[in-house]
Image: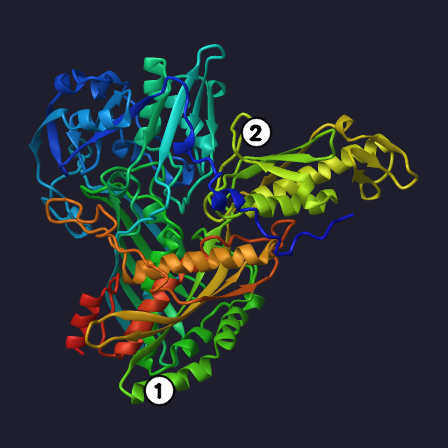
Amino acid sequence: MTSGYIGVSVERDDLAFLDGTACYVADVDREGQLYARVVRSPVAHARILDVDVAEALAQPGVVAVITAADIPETRIPIRLPMAETPYTHLFLQPPLAREAVRYVGEPVAVVVASDPYLAEDAAELVDVDFDELDVVSDILSATTQGTPLVHAEAGTNIVATVPLGYGDVEAAFARADVVIRDRLRMHRHTAVPMETRGLLAEMDHGTGVLTLWGAAKVKHFTRSALSSMLGIERHRIRLVENHVGGGFGVRGEPYPEDFLVAFLALRLGRPIKWIEDRAEHFVATNHAREQEHDLEIAATADGRLLAFRDRAWCDQGAYVRSQGILPALLPALHLPGPYRWEAFSVETQGVLTNRTPVGTYRGPGMTEATFVRERMLDKLAAELRLDPAELRRRNLIRPGELPFSFEPAPITYESGDFPAGFEHLLDEVGYDDLCKQRQVRRASGEHVGIGFAAYTEIGAIGPFEEARIVPRSDGRFVVHVGVASLGQGVETVLGQIAAEKLGVPMDAVSIDHHDTEKLADGFGAFASRSTTLAGNAVALAAEDLRAKAAARLDVSAGEIRFVQGQVREPSGRTIPLAEVGEGRGRFDKPHPTFSFGAALSLVSIDRETGLVKVLRHAVLHDVGRAVNPELLRRQLAGAASQGIGAALLEELLYDEYGQPQSTIMADYRMPTVEELPDIEVIVEERPNTANPLGVKGGGESGMVGTPAAIANAVADALGVEGARVWRLPLTPDRVREMLRHH
């Protein structure tokens, strides 16, 4: 029996976020707590000659000041084995800089005081004697002969080289009627969640358990990392997830502060609290995206794609953090996109610079790859005098070719209908009429353009998730999962799955994702995986619970009902629900799922100011099966809004000395409702046979194609043949410069 919740737009319960009762980590206090303030490097590259803490330590209210000399030699480990190489350990970050600092914002010391303001004032008095070194300030110079080394002991600024190949590239290029080549650049930006990072750590001297509040995203991995770094058993560390004010990839990875706050709580025997301020966030929390691609595409005269070659340089910043080489690996996996290439050759390099380390941000790698590939496809369409939509139509992989693999590259598309999805987008926006409107507006002197992007999104990354369903005597069910809630509505979606599979009302189910004590293992919330991995684990746990209950009554699982704290079978026999035990489920997924998406943007350009206005923006995504269609639409719209900000406004700039130029909100321009149109969202449901629920990821797709679609629309508005739109963001000054040369 089911209650029909899967596929229904159940409204999520957001009351706590709206009425002020949500409990963020900053709201948590413990008796006798102290406050930590991190002393950060003001220079991008220097030897540390001395750290004098005497004056800071002498201040009233200051309890301790620690430097690298006070902590064990340890490094932040890499989270995913696929993102690790035999050499990445050379570039891992220590919690506090020892012999050298390598970026502005790197932690050098920590001040602990009885009051956060006293700690901040005392931190200003820590005197660090620096011997400044030459700086690697951009990815272009990082690999140049004779350039300074970010890690001198490693002897190179190259973290890793990722080669990827398919087919006979040379033969395909030799047959080409047209070859185009360009160098394109995706800029450095980051997620800016409303809530900055924060931690509160306390040792329970009775139980010997260290508890950290403020965990997010990957609680279980952070627990394992801290166990290794602190040298204490995993079961003596507990991570608690409070309400989280946004994540988008940057919140919840282990950072230096995770170790430092925990270490100080152990060392001082008192609770330690640290809350990141916004200026710290801009230099301490992971940055993302910055890459440069030298891309060459070969095609026939009738617009058939043959092959491409790409060489890319991907900024890792000053250290390899817990994402390992993902900044170089993920774009390589997404460069082919949803097209039928005969061959390709990719080489992406992760390179070091003296800037804040780079990690993942919504749609990592796939957003950058989509921008460079789709921008080049529009250039190819112009060269061939083809409508950009028609070029894509001729080359999208057909449904009869699925599953489609680019072996030996680890890229397999399992399910979907890429051409039908693309046509669905064009039909929904009225592409033919849109083209006519564009011509009318251009005739009146307006600069108006249309741009597309088609792409694939990797998601549902394993290896597994587990779920545990605990029945209560009052007839309710508590579902314990290892994923995290970062604002995506995971509690509602998993609750729908549990309620349907158990055959009970939604209000009889509660989702518990907050505490590592409640479930032994979990891999967290990232890569659009929560619904696929945890959702299927919850479904399996519900089936297990039903099977156990049915066995007690000697009937089939389909015959039982959970009613008012009882298990009932058709003849009326019952047993107490609490006697059944727990339901457990584990869903293993060794391979990721690629899903299809597309975006279309209509823009106008003010010739006098260079200001780009997005008039319409639509995103389409194949989610396999939508558990909650409305929540999915909101996720896609939110991601697309972030993509518009990335395309037109947001940028983390540095000068030639490695000094960040965007450390306050006034300098890092984020979109407001004034810059955002109503996002048009189109949900496709083509079930994925690789998992029982048939679902695919959906949390990132709205971002993936948006910068590319906007860039193509701007190029179209300027005149595709005359405008070299090769870098983002398309700020008014850059667009005005292109207009002057048009």
Q: Is residue 136 above or below residue 108?
A: below
Query: What's under tag 1, amino acid-wise?
Result: Gln
Left or right: 408 as drawn, with respect to 695: left
Colouring mode (rainbow / by chain / secondary structure / one colour): rainbow
Residue found 47% across the figure and 29% down from its top: 240
Residue 500, visible in the rendered structure: yes
Depth check, front residue: 158 or 532 = 532
Q: Quadrant of residue 550 in the image?
A: top right
Depth check, front residue: 431 or 629 = 629
Depth check, front residue: 739 or 638 = 638
- Disc 1 residue crowd, few under 14, some 14–19, many 20+, Cα 10 Å: some
| Residue 519, numbered circle | 2
Q: Quadrant of residue 650 in the image?
A: bottom left
**How far apart, in angstroms, are the residues tagged by discs 2 and 1?**
59 Å
Q: Residue 493 location, x and y as percent?
A: 59, 48
Q: Residue 295 location, x and y as percent?
A: 28, 63
Depth check, front residue: 527 or 409 = 527
Q: Quadrant of residue 132 in the image?
A: top left
Residue at mark 1 = 439
